[in-house]
Image (spheres, helix red, strand yellow):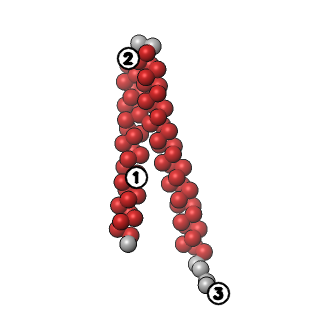
Amino acid sequence: MIALGTAPLLKMVYSSIIVGVSVALVFSIAVFGVIRSSDMRRASRHGASARFAAIGLLALLASAAIAIAGLVLVIHKG
């Protein structure tokens, strides 16, 4: 029988759950910002449109940064 350490497995499980939820949340904020920006632009609320566009852009950059950081960690792990 193969004995496995449970501590590294549990760490992997909760880490992947936290990262998965975080990436999904940040990307959903990006989608929300872009959609609301479009809605505000159609309603001729240009200031609000710009703010929502900025939120969407920042969240999109954050999700890209999370993905790149994950790739860097995987590449340097091996």
Residue at 58% x, 78% y is 5
Q: Amino acid at mark 1?
A: Ala
Q: Secondary structure at mark 2?
A: helix
Q: Amino acid at mark 2?
A: His
Percent of width and height locating residue 64:
38, 47
Image quadrant of residue 8?
A: bottom right
Percent of width and height locating residue 11:
55, 67
In front: label 3 or label 2: 3
**Residue named by callout 2:** 46
Percent of width and height locating residue 34:
43, 30
Q: Secondary structure at mark 3?
A: loop
Neighbor class of circle 2 (other Cα within 10 Å; few <14, some 14-19, many 20+) is some
In front: label 2 or label 1: 1
Image quadrant of residue 68?
A: bottom left
Percent of width and height locating residue 63:
41, 46
Neighbor class of circle 3 (other Cα within 10 Å; few <14, some 14-19, many 20+) is few
Looking at the image, is 11 positioned above or below residue 28?
Answer: below
- Distance, label 1 to label 3, CA atoms, is 37 Å
Residue at 50% x, 39% y is 28
Badge 3 or badge 2: first in the primary sequence: 3
**Residue named by callout 1:** 67
Is there a contact, CB below 8 Å, between mark 2 and mark 1? Answer: no
Examine the rendering and report whether any part of residue 48 can be seen: no
**Residue named by callout 3:** 1
Q: Amino acid at mark 3?
A: Met
Neighbor class of circle 1 (other Cα within 10 Å; few <14, some 14-19, many 20+) is some
- Distance, label 2 to label 1, CA atoms, is 31 Å
